[in-house]
Image: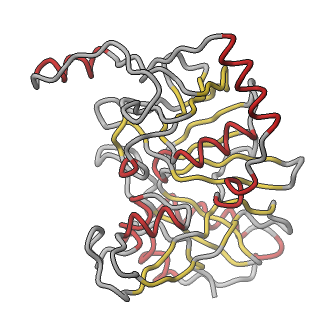
Amino acid sequence: MDTISHSPSVWRAFIYVLSSLSFLSVAQAANIYPWPEGGDTVIGDNQLTQVAQGETLLDIAERFGLGYADIRDANPDLDPWIPAVGAEVRLPTRYILPATPWQGIVINLAEYRLYYFLPEQHEIHTYPIGIGRSNTPTPQGDMQISARIPNPTWYPPASIRQRWQESGEEVRWQVPAGPDNPLGPFAINLSAEGYLIHGTNQRFGIGAQTSAGCIRMNNRDIEALVNTTKIGVPVRIISEPTKVGILANQLVLESHRPLNPSDPTKNHTDVVYALSQLRQQESIENIQINWHKVEQVFNHHQGIAEVISH
């Protein structure tokens, strides 16, 4: 949970900037996919790349629109910070869309991912995110965008001021825009009071539980999101570690680590039931499920959306 401030004059300047500048290069850098057709509920495709000299897995993740958890879990045998040069890296850039209405913004905490549905443009935008720590979790539920703010001032919550005091650091009541501001260049106010979607000055926090409850995004991503949203856009926050979907008349399964060991998650019976429900569709009612593959994907929590039917 963070707090910010803005003035009418700053807001008018912001409107002018947005109306006069093009953010095409930013938009292209994000993951933007066409709306799926033919009953599909999956976008994108998985990819492979190799580690270049001096690269960390986080560097590669940022290049392909992924977060730390995405690339860490998909490549458990690689050192995230000193991977071997030339090593093959799996990129989980195929996404099963959340099993919720495809409207506005949907944030899946367990996936560390935000989806923005734009049916008029026939597009879906998706971005990696950072979320709240276990002791300051990001709230779930339905809300909406209440403001979009450039160069926000950060007012540290009491918990952070107390931490500074206990560690002997300088206690600051506000931090202006700049490199020391953890809100980055833009912030989106949510109707859940005190919670934001904002940029960051800590890139390692994307794809991790590191915030005081707010949603963090890479700065280029929050800029693109601010440019394409408006006040009143609905925001739904869920936590679904396991997802099932349909791609080209095949069944696809994706499993992520639960955020906390005590979190309720789909068990094996739930997954079997969800797959059985999807198989009732006429186009895939006769396909055969590879149950060995189901077990493998479900138990390994690598976050890779994989075909589990023959």
Q: Residue at x 38, y 32 (%)?
A: 137
Front in this rendered view, residue 55 or 49: 55
Q: Residue at x 61, y 19 (%)?
A: 191
Q: How is the image coloured?
A: secondary structure
Tell which residue pokes out farthest to the right in this image: 120
Vertical relation: 172 (above or below) 73: above
Vertical relation: 186 (above or below) 46: above
Query: In terms of image quadrants, where is residue 224?
Result: top right
> In this image, 48 relative to 235: left or right?
left
Q: Residue at x 82, y 75 (%)?
A: 283
Looking at the rendered image, the quarter that the N terminus falls into is: top left
Question: Which x, y percent locates residue 212?
Answer: 36, 29
Question: Which x, y percent locates residue 74?
Answer: 41, 72
> In this image, 160 relative to 142: left or right?
left
Q: Residue at x 85, y 48 (%)?
A: 119
Question: Which x, y percent locates residue 288?
Answer: 64, 84
Looking at the rendered image, the quarter that the C terminus falls into is: bottom right
Vertical relation: 153 (above or below) 300: above
Question: Which x, y percent locates residue 76?
Answer: 31, 74
